[in-house]
């Protein structure tokens, strides 16, 4: 089932955790015992979005393997073509998200307003 990506204005107002952009690093994803990969577009403590190599259905539960001993369950919240939005069933620790970002994401800088 394909659903449109949520409206960014309303979804950003509902979002609790800031999203960190990613460069498309692939992580293993499993759904109903089948394996595949997701190339992350962004990540936060509460969820992620990215490009999957297998079609997923809204409402499906998946497991993402971020590291050998760190497998996280998430619900598919939206699907647009092969892009998916995921909400983690248990939030990720901020320190873990920072370590993933340092290893696989992009470096985010802020510019002071002068």
Image: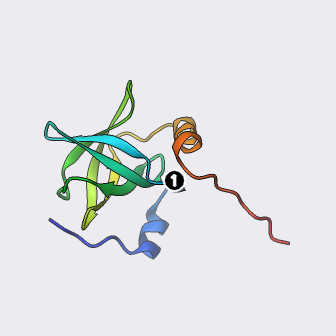
Quarter of the rendering occupied by the C terminus: bottom right
| Residue found at x 49% / y 56% | 16
Count of marks, rendered view: 1
| Residue found at x 38% / y 24% | 69
Q: Of all residues shown, which one is farthest toward the top?
A: 69
Residue 38's x, y, as percent?
33, 49
Classify mark 1: helix, strand or loop: loop
| Residue found at x 40% / y 50% | 47
Residue 12 placement, left or right of 87: right
Colour scheme in use? rainbow
| Residue found at x 14% / y 65% | 1
- Please, is residue 78 above or below residue 35 in the view? below
Residue 41 quadrant:
bottom left
Along the line of sight, which residue is nearer the eye, 1 or 28?
A: 28
Residue 106's x, y, as percent?
58, 52
- Please, is residue 97 above or below residue 21 in the view? above
Residue at which label 1 appears: 17
Q: Of all residues shown, which one is farthest toward the right?
A: 114
Residue 76's x, y, as percent?
26, 54
- Please, is residue 112 above or below residue 69 in the view? below
Along the line of sight, which residue is nearer the eye, 74 or 51?
A: 51
Along the line of sight, which residue is nearer the eye, 43 or 37?
A: 37
Q: Residues within 10 Å of mark 1 (few under 14, many from 20)?
A: some
Residue 60 placement, left or right of 15: left
Residue 22 placement, left or right of 74: right
Residue 111 quadrant:
bottom right
Residue 10's x, y, as percent?
43, 73
């Amino acid at each position: 089932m394909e659903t449109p990506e949520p409206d960014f204005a309303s979804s950003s107002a509902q979002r609790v955790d800031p999203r960190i952009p990613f460069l498309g690093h692939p992580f293993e994803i499993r759904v109903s015992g089948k394996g595949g990969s997701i190339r992350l577009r962004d990540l936060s403590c509460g969820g992620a979005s990215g490009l999957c190599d297998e079609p997923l259905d809204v409402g499906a539960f998946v497991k993402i393997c971020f590291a050998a001993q760190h497998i996280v369950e998430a619900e598919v919240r939206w699907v647009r073509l092969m892009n998916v939005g995921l909400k983690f069933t248990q939030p990720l620790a901020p320190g873990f998200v920072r370590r993933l970002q340092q290893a696989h994401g992009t470096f985010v800088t802020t510019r002071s307003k002068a």
